[in-house]
């Protein structure tokens, strides 16, 4: 049996606050579809974790929202 765990495949830098798409939608008080559109427009970065999962850095989400509100 190997002493390596499955979590070894996940290379997430320390100090980031990670969230799922659903959590980001709730955090922004918007829909999952809106989060998808924000990713498509390049406003948010979705980080793949494995083949099917993605995560978002809440620090980047905060920066995006702050930059958007300062532009108005």
Image (tube, rainbow, N blue to C red):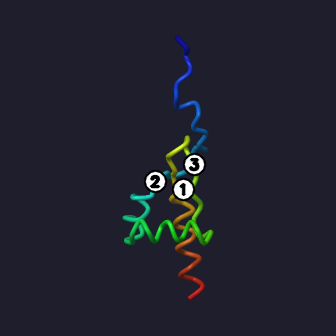
Q: Earlier in the sequence, mark 1 or mark 2?
A: 2
Camera-side residue: 11 or 35?
35
Give the residue at the far front of this rendering: 51
Residue 43 in percent (x, y) is at 59, 70
Give the residue at the far top of this rendering: 1
- Could you tell me which residue is drawn at 52 percent across and 71 percent down? 37
Camera-side residue: 54 or 51?
51
Q: Are marks 2 and 3 in contact (CB under 8 Å)?
A: no
Residue 24 in percent (x, y) is at 44, 62
Q: Are marks 1 and 2 in contact (CB under 8 Å)?
A: yes
Count of numbered marks:
3
Q: Quadrant of residue 59?
A: bottom right
Q: Are marks 1 and 3 in contact (CB under 8 Å)?
A: no
Q: Earlier in the sequence, mark 1 or mark 3?
A: 3
Q: Residues within 10 Å of mark 3 (few under 14, many from 20)?
A: few
In whole angstroms, how far apart are the C-alphas of marks 1 and 3?
11 Å
In whole angstroms, how far apart are the C-alphas of marks 1 and 2?
6 Å
- Could you tell me which residue is drawn at 44 percent across and 68 percent down? 33
Camera-side residue: 17 or 6?
6
In whole angstroms, how far apart are the C-alphas of marks 2 and 3?
12 Å
- Could you tell me which residue is drawn at 51 percent across and 52 percent down? 55
**Quadrant (top left, top right, bottom left, bottom right) of the C terminus:** bottom right
- Could you tell me which residue is drawn at 54 percent across and 70 percent down? 38
Q: Earlier in the sequence, mark 2 or mark 3?
A: 2
Say which element carries label 2: strand
> Which residue does the numbered mark 2 point to in the structure image?
19
User: Which labelled disc corresponds to residue 48?
Assistant: 3
The mark lying in front, picked from 1 and 3, is 3
Residue 14 in percent (x, y) is at 58, 43
> Which residue does the numbered mark 1 point to in the structure image?
57
Q: Residues within 10 Å of mark 2 (few under 14, many from 20)?
A: some
């Amino acid at each position: 049996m190997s002493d390596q765990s499955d979590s070894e495949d996940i290379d997430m830098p320390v100090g980031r606050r990670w969230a799922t798409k659903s959590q980001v939608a709730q955090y922004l008080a918007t829909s999952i579809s809106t989060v998808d559109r924000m990713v498509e427009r390049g406003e948010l970065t979705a980080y793949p974790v494995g083949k099917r999962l993605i995560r978002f850095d809440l620090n980047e989400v905060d920066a995006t929202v702050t930059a958007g509100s300062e532009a108005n």
